[in-house]
Every structure is written in C-alpha cells, then in structure tokens.
Amino acid sequence: MQIAFKGYVAGAAAATDLVNTSPRVRSAGDALPDSASLDRFLAEHSLRPDAPRKSDDLARVHGLRDEIRAVLEADEDEAARRAGELVARAGTGPRLHRDADGRWQWHAETAPHASLADELAAVFGTGLLGALQALGHDRFRHCAAPDCDGVFVDTSRAGRRRYCMPDLCGNRVSVANHRARSRERS
C-alpha cells in the first residue's frame, strides 16, 4: 500500500472515525462488530490495503483503535512518539512516485509482510503525524458533548470543530439546548 504524505487529512479523519466506532463512545455498542462492518469502514474511507485478510484482522483493528485513542489523548511529545511507532509498524520509509499528472509526490510504502492492522496503523499514524505537524497538538480534542467519550482530530480549516461526530453528538446537544430554551419560555 502507498500512503501519500499530502493526504494527512484523510488519514487523520479515518483515525478519528475508527476510534469513534468503539463501544466506549457509542452507546449502541461497537460499530465494528464483525468483518463485514470492517469491510464497509475500509470502503467508506477508500482504504484498499494490500495485506491478505486473516481471521484475527478484526481483533487487531480493535487493538489499533485503542492505540490511536492513546495517541489522541497523549501530550504532544508522546503523541508524536506513538504516532511514529504506528507508522513504523508497516512502513518501509518515504519514497517518491509520480502522481497521475506526472508530478513527484512523497509516499510511505508498507512492507509486503504487513498485516491489515499494521497497514492501517501506517495510514493512520501518517495522518496523525501530518495533522500534528501542520495543525498543532491543540487540534487533538475530546468531544464537547457532555454524554460522549469520543475523541477526534479537528482538521477543519477554521479549527472550531467541537464534536467527534457532528451529525450525532452535535445534533444531540442542539436538540437538548432547543428543548431547554422551550421549557424556559413556557
């Protein structure tokens, strides 16, 4: 698998989404309960790992999910160290390859023997390192929803994202605020 360095936003976003599939974040339970849900997650994020599929892939991705959460909750130096370790698990170092337009682009390649979880670790670690370098550690955040334990990387241009899953957590907070205002008026 080749990971484009210019694509750190996609890697950081996918890392955020993976962490927030956890039953620790979702009251409805694990959003990755089986291999089919893992396949959907990979497809939704346009991830096409080269690693042959194995029976323990799901368990290893669940472990990776916990490792990524630890990166997001760590202080700045520890986050850089841990994300670097994720990249090193499957990476073989940077290389230059031509893109579709013939321009040179930096890529990290994964080793031929890398497992699915290791290839994903390299993708997500690269995204997290890119976000740390380009945006700063203050973009690694906890969800602002009072009833949520989610974490995320704010890759938005303005840097004002507050919720791990804006469609779910942000909406829930907005509805609660609306109901509170309606009760005050009555």
Image (cartoon, rainbow, N blue to C red):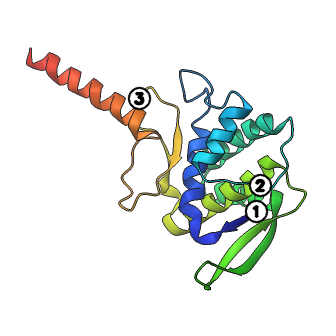
What amino acid is found at the position of numbered circle 2 in the picture? Answer: Glu
Pick the residue in front: 31 or 130: 31
Real-space Cα separation, disc 1 to disc 3, in angstroms? 39 Å
Q: Residue at x 72, y 29 (%)?
A: 34
Q: Which mark is residue 151?
A: none
Residue found farthest to the top = 186
Real-space Cα separation, disc 3 to disc 2, in angstroms? 34 Å
Q: Residue at x 66, y 60 (%)?
A: 80
Front: mark 3 or 2? 2
Residue found farthest to the left = 185
Q: In the image, is residue 173 above or below residue 83?
A: above
What amino acid is found at the position of numbered circle 3 in the picture? Answer: Pro
Pick the residue in front: 37 or 22: 37
Question: Pointers 3 and 2 in contact (CB under 8 A)?
Answer: no
> What quarter of the picture does the C terminus occupy?
top left
Real-space Cα separation, disc 2 to disc 1, in angstroms? 7 Å
Q: Residue at x 35, y 60 (%)?
A: 158
N-terminal-most mark, 2 or 1: 1
Residue of label 2: 119
In this figure, what is the number of numbered marks? 3
Residue of label 1: 1
Q: In the image, is residue 116 above or below residue 87?
A: above
Front: mark 2 or 1? 1
Residue of label 3: 146
Residue 84 in the image, given as x and y percentages of width and height: 73, 61
Mark 2: which secondary structure? helix
